[in-house]
Amino acid sequence: MKKILQCFWKDKKANRGSLAVLMITVILSTTAVFGVINALPLLKMAIGNDMKNASYGRSDFVVNGLEYELFSLGNIKTEAKVTGILNWYGILKDGGEKKCEIAAADYSVLPEVFDIRMADGEYLESDTKGAVITKWLADKLALKQGDVLKISINDKQYSFTVSGIALNRGLFADSTYLILLPKNKLDTILGVGTDDVNIAYIYDCDAKTASSDIGVPDNLHLKKVVDEDIINSEISLYALLLVFILIFVFLIAFYIIYNVYNIFVVERAGYIGTLRSCGATRKYIRKVFITANIIISAISGMIGTLLGGTVICLFAWKVMSVNYLKEEAGYMLVSFAVTMFFAIVLAMVSISIPLNHVLKYSERALLNNEIEKNKTRISAVPVVAFAITLFLWGLTSIWNTGNLLTECIIFMLFIVTSIIGIRFFVYFMDRIVGKRIGKGPLLIAAKNVIHNIYVQKNITLIAVLSILLILVGSLSYSVLKGLTSFYNNYKCNAYFETYTYFDKDDLQKIKQIEGLDRSYPCISKRMMIQKKESVSCFIEDSPEKFSDEFLEFNIRWKDFSQDEFAKGRYCILSDVLSKRYNLSAGDYVEISRENIEEKYQIAAICYTTIEKGNFIFLSTYDIPFENCTNPNLILADCDNVPDFFEGLEAAFADRTLFMTTVEDKIKEDEESSKSLIAMFMAFSLFVVLIGVQGIYNNFKLSYINRKKEFAVMISNGYRMQKLFQIIFIETILCSLAGGIIALIYIQFYRNAIVDIMFLMDLALPLINKAWIIVTPVLLCIAASLVSILVSCRQISGIKKNMINILKI
């Protein structure tokens, strides 16, 4: 066995470059699989990291009242350290009145909880006297250190010296419009005591400290900062989708490895024929190849997982400041075992299929390399597969089974039949071009695309990888948008609110302001749910109309009539809250505000990413809460937002309005979610790299195996320039054919994917932007064109060694 394996590695007829290509393919594929398996804990870590470091720093618990209710730090009973922030709102002049958030704190204590990094690389110093603003806000208002910042607080203007410009991290990560002030200055302005705050942070707790160990008044809400249940409820929206992406990555890896192994086995057909003629049995030959395959897979798999683990750990350390190896050592060990198992099993399956096919031939056929003859035979299988694909497309377009497992099985069958059916397009092209007679480079290249087995494989590979890369890109981008841009659900471009409310005369005045296309008055308040946490609430009798026209909520009514919603005390819970409190449609939930409590029946569940799912709807029927009957928030759609805000300011000169553009909020979300964006971008780019590398390697191997074909053409008088021209045209036609097939199929899949996401209860739409669809196709075409450089080197070497090549 040892000597046979040595011959296997050193077989001169089988170019050793293919062995290197094979190992590189397995290395990168296992790296991708290892990375995707670790994507979920990385995502959880990123969310937890953002929750803790962005909003709560090093605190273990946070205490707050309803809206801006003040309380004294002395009322919190704990052995741990406690500090607080006086959180308020002010008005900035930023092309109109812009609502800003003010956080007042003791600068000598605040750094114990938050790492506030300044733009110059230093940290916030305890002796800082003035205001600290974000670099983003400083650039927007053209401010620098030492300048004067004017803020209107409670309808009175105050001036503060800008003493520091901070990066959008830590305390500033959630709001680019946050302004940090010394607490004694805001205390004086508001006339409150030194211990009065509305947010308190409890830190340096013992590891075993529970919520029950901390005493807080009944009117305050105590929350554990990093709560696994809350993180799991948020990430459960996306876990199934990540599994879906993992399946596509498995398919990408399998298809690339299968194609490389297929060529790897076929080019060693002569070696297999030699073994057979020397008396080796089929069983023994399988043993030889599978043993070699296990060695290749084990070595390449270990290198791939080591590379993947290194990349993940470096990414977690550099982007999220987390020691991933320390935090998830057990999970990484399991991931290593799963990835190695995947590498070996997948490689064994990939080599067994072409090996069993080759072993069907006689020794003579193998020695004479006659095994390709039957591959050009037209089969009815691709035609049948394409017909099934069309049937499944029609089926998924008009009918939904309503069962997630059934839909997933149909979709996987859809993908398999469509991949097999790609050969139908080749047969179709054969009907158009195959019978034409001529000698031009274009016609020769077109005939090669149709009849050459290696070029056909390239068409299929480009089509399949383009399809899978588009699916991975669309799903990743959808998840990314769902996690980082909670304002994409808005179907308007601005909104404004007031401390009090808008009466009928105010609403009529708003409608008359020039530039307003349409508006929707809302009642927006904060409510306590189950006496545990404060959530955002819309009080609205027509939530479906509201969702359709201004703010998408994806409401699922199930067995409840929409018309009944306004006729009783009904509510709509977000999917996140329903899972967090184990509630479903028909159950009752306790809603409270300012010591008034009431039971509401859940009429429906909405699947929304607004407020990270911490959201409810209430009907206006017999509303028991005070100051909850008149609108205080207006959603607006304007031709020109700045001009409209200017007109709004003039119309309500005697009142303070807080005006916000949806565009600004989206920018803030993206700014505060850089770690999540970086993670998904890195993940998507790596998957694309694997696909592009697979196409490049497949083209490279096809050129290696077509050496004899090129040698025959040169010996028949083809000049090198003409041969390069044929190969170039051939590559362009092959790439375009594969890309067009991918674009056709991706339209087939859309309805099926949307149905599956609906059944998964995912609170986000499938985003199919043009650049997501076109970019993978262009990258695949680019990889194909780059591979021409390999063909140039191959052809240049053929001329020098033509006689030996023709002897093979």
Image: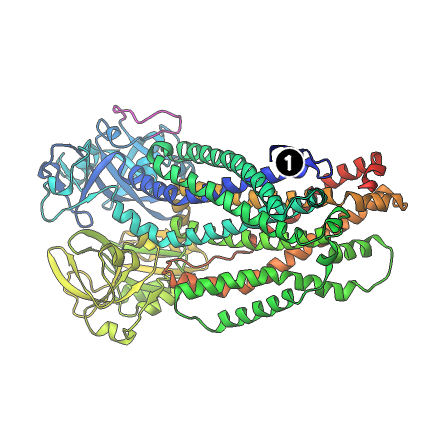
* Viewer can see residue 514: no
Range drawn in magenta: 117-128
Find numbered disc 1 in the image and state the secondary structure of the residue it sits on. Answer: helix
Q: Quadrant of the C terminus?
A: top right
Q: Is residue 518 left or right of residue 563?
A: right
Q: Is residue 215 left or right of residue 184?
A: left
| Amino acid tagged 1 | Ile
Magenta region includes residue 804? no
Q: How many marks?
A: 1
Which image quarter: residue 337?
top left
Please, is residue 162 above or below residue 280 in the view? above
The dominant secondary structure in magenta is loop
x and y percent of residue 628 in the render? 20, 62
Task: Name the foreground residue: 419 vs 347.
Answer: 347
x and y percent of residue 720 in the render? 84, 41
x and y percent of residue 674 in the render? 41, 41
Q: Is residue 782 left or right of residue 319?
A: right
Task: Name the foreground residue: 205 vs 148.
Answer: 205
At 65% from the left and 44% from the top, the residue drawn is 280
Which image quarter: residue 13?
top right
Magenta region includes residue 121? yes
Task: Name the foreground residue: 226 vs 90.
Answer: 226
What colour-coding does the image apply? rainbow
* Viewer can see residue 196: yes
Residue density around tag 1, few if under 14, some if 14–19, many if 20 or more, within 10 Å: few
Q: Quadrant of the N terminus?
A: top right
Residue that protrudes farthest toward the right in the picture: 717
Disc 1 target residue: 4
Please, is residue 647 above or below residue 428 in the view? above
Q: Is residue 145 left or right of residue 798?
A: left
x and y percent of residue 735 in the render? 68, 52
